[in-house]
Image (cartoon, rainbow, N blue to C red):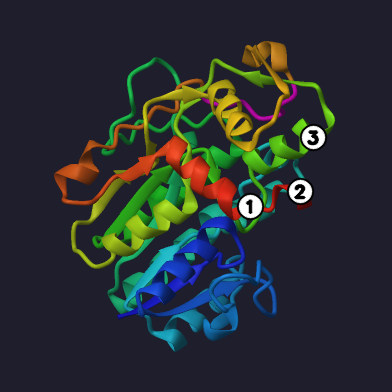
Amino acid sequence: MKVFVTGMNGQLGYDVMNELYARGIDSIGSGTTEQYSGIQDGTPVNTMPYVTMDLMDAESVDRVITEVSPDVIIHCAAKTKVDRAEDEDYKPLVQGVNADGTRSLARAAKKLDIPMVYISTDYVFDGQGTEPWKEDCTDYAPLNFYGKTKMEGELAVAELLEKFFIVRIAWVFGKNGNNFIKTMLRVGKTHEEVRVVNDQIGTPTYTKDLARLLVDMIGTDKYGYYHATNEGGYISWYDFTKEFYRQAGYKTRVIPVTTEEYGLSKAARPRNSRLNKSKLVENGFEPLPDWKDAVKRYLEELDIDSL
């Protein structure tokens, strides 16, 4: 099997490539830079083939995928700066990568008759209510432009392909790149207290755990929609922060506030990001570990002092 991975320079793409490498699976990563620009420790990335591909350029996508001729595509690349995505000058890039670029990839997969994994998000829903969103739910109602483009990516994949995995995730953290944990650890170093919202509910996703699941998935034909976040129950961003501060040994006070009280976000966020993950077990996949355990393993990997 040969696997093509987009977004190798990002949080998830990096861990997917490492998981494939660890299992001895032939793989090639891609990004927009001339060469891989992520972290260099751990698995020697120079042993992993890398190609430049511009998702904004449909011809580039078709040419690269045709030349590589993979057996499956894992599409990790995305523009995920949710607030920045509301800026008019940034919207064309978000649209071009998340929606149009995904459609170009799906067309290339269809041309080769190969499966594709598309990483989506809880942001495709409106976040209302308290019931967990079911995997096969397509009652799309994104609250922000980022969510709209990810929804359009889902629609393109489902429209063009029969062999696909659409995997919705939430609250992502990984070693290669920036995320909420890293940001709050930096802030906690210099502040005696921080304010964190406690009315947005969901579960985090550790990219290393998710990468293992995605590689398991591509070895099967159990296609369809899935939700994949870490286990351990639904929590708020406040609960999340309290726990990783505790594990990191921080004494910073965490003050719970409502979304309205916080008031710093340009893009609207869903209050209900609870994702039903029962389909994983039903189809024989191993759920992701408890999120507290994921945080523990993640912090052991991080050099907190260098943040």
Q: Which amino acid, by three-letter code, is at mark 2?
A: Asp
Residue 285 lies, in percent from the top left, at 22, 51
As drawn, is 283 to the left or to the right of 20?
left
| Most common SS among magenta residues | loop
Residue at horizontal 40 percent and vertical 41 percent from the top: 229
> Which circle's residue, 1 or 3, is located before the other in the chain?
3
Q: Answer whether residue 95 is magenta in the image.
A: no
Residue at horizontal 65 percent and vertical 55 percent from the top: 177
Q: Quadrant of residue 78?
A: bottom right
Query: Can you see residue 151?
Result: no
> Which circle's residue, 3 or 2, is located before the other in the chain?
3
Q: Most extreme residue toward the front, as rendered?
A: 249
- In the depicted structure, whether residue 213 falls above or below residue 148: below
Where does label 3 land, which residue? 189
Residue 52 lies, in percent from the top left, at 61, 78
Q: Which amino acid, by three-letter code, is at mark 3?
A: Lys
Where does label 2 land, which residue? 305
Asked if the residues shown at circle 2 and circle 1 are in contact, with their CB atoms under 8 angstroms apart, the answer is no
As drawn, is 97 to the left or to the right of 113?
right
Where does label 1 land, which residue? 302
Which stretch appears magenta?
A: 264-270
